[in-house]
Image (cartoon, grey):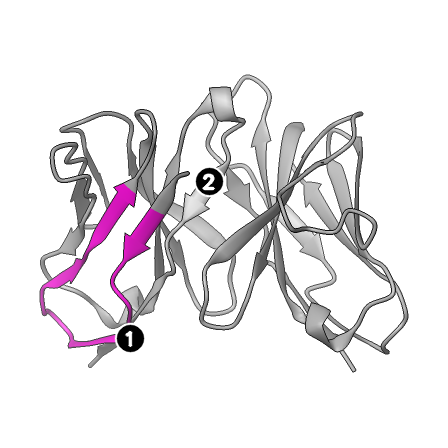
């Protein structure tokens, strides 16, 4: 079956530091890959996505590249802000054929200190 | 953008009672809705998939008689936790995708259930 593994948190950083959250996946087909963010007290929001190998998703200064050869989709941001403090989830979907069901990683809590 | 709203956001109930959680798509028609359960400091576990007008499809290990899901209209799905027990205490999240869309899922804010 499908699975997503991401680094455990919490990750504590200072403002303007570089952030990397590792994510690797196992899938039977060619999934789409996602990063979702959950800010305190809010629901999950799509942060970025990539639908095929070598695609790069980007949003709000975050980037992640779909690496088929290493089955990875690591999330990076060059300079974090306090407002980036949240829980980040890596996820995959086999797409419409599978009803858009998402398989989530365990989530990584990120805390950015001023 | 597409907005999904859940109600209530927090509910406390006594053991043995039933609790209903609503998930509404406010500005789009949701052909498919998903219900997830999130344990503390854990990931989201898919419980079931519901399509408007048909029975929900439950994931392995999820008791369909305990977690009743109804998707009676294109804008509303409900999750009823029947005969709740303290171990059912959790954060329940719904998500929805809309007809003719890209397949992107939109998530509700979640509903925290505490069973005493």
Image quadrant where one finds the C terminus of chain A = bottom left
- Horizontal side of B116 relative to A111 (left or right) equals right
Identity of the residue drawn at 29% across and 27% down: A51
Q: Which residue is labeled 1 in the image?
A: A10
Q: Quadrant of residue B43?
A: bottom left
Residue A49 in the image, given as x and y percentages of width and height: 30, 37
Element class at badge 2: strand
Image quadrant where one finds the N terminus of chain A = top left
Point out the residue furthest to the right here: B17
Identity of the residue drawn at 9% across and 58% down: A78
Identity of the residue drawn at 46% across and 40% down: A102
Q: Does A99 sit above or below residue A75?
A: above
Is residue B111 or residue A6 the one in the foreground?
A6
Is residue A77 or residue A74 the one in the foreground?
A74
The verdict on a common chain for dots 2 and 1 is: yes
- Horizontal side of A47 relative to A58 (left or right) equals right
Q: Residues within 10 Å of mark 1 (few under 14, many from 20)?
A: few
Residue A4 in the image, given as x and y percentages of width and height: 33, 48
User: Do callouts 2 and 1 mark residues in contact (Cβ within 8 Å)?
Assistant: no
| Residue B52 numbered mark, or none | none
Q: Is residue A10 magenta?
A: yes
Q: Which residue is labeled 2 in the image?
A: A102
Q: Does the magenta stretch include residue B91?
A: no
The chain holding disc 1 is A
């Amino acid at each position: 079956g499908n699975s997503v593994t991401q680094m455990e948190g919490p990750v504590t950083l200072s403002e303007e530091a570089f952030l990397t959250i590792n994510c690797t996946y196992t899938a039977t087909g060619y999934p789409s890959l996602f990063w979702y963010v959950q800010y305190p007290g809010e629901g999950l929001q799509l942060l970025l996505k990539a639908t095929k190998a070598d695609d790069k998703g980007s949003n709000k200064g975050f980037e992640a590249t779909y690496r088929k050869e290493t089955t990875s989709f690591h999330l990076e941001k060059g300079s974090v802000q306090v407002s980036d403090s949240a829980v980040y989830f890596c996820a995959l979907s086999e797409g419409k054929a599978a009803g858009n069901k998402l398989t989530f990683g365990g989530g990584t809590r990120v805390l950015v200190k001023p | 953008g597409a907005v999904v709203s859940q109600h209530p956001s927090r509910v406390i109930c006594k053991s043995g009672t039933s609790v209903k959680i609503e998930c509404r798509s406010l500005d789009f028609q949701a052909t498919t809705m998903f219900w997830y359960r999130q344990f503390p400091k854990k990931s989201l576990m898919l419980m079931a998939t519901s399509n408007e007008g048909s029975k929900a499809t439950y994931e392995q290990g999820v008791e369909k008689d305990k977690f009743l899901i109804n998707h009676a209209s294109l804008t509303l799905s409900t999750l009823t936790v029947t005969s709740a027990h303290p171990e059912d205490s959790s954060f329940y999240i719904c998500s929805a995708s809309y007809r003719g869309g890209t397949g992107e899922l939109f998530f509700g804010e979640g509903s925290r259930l505490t069973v005493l």
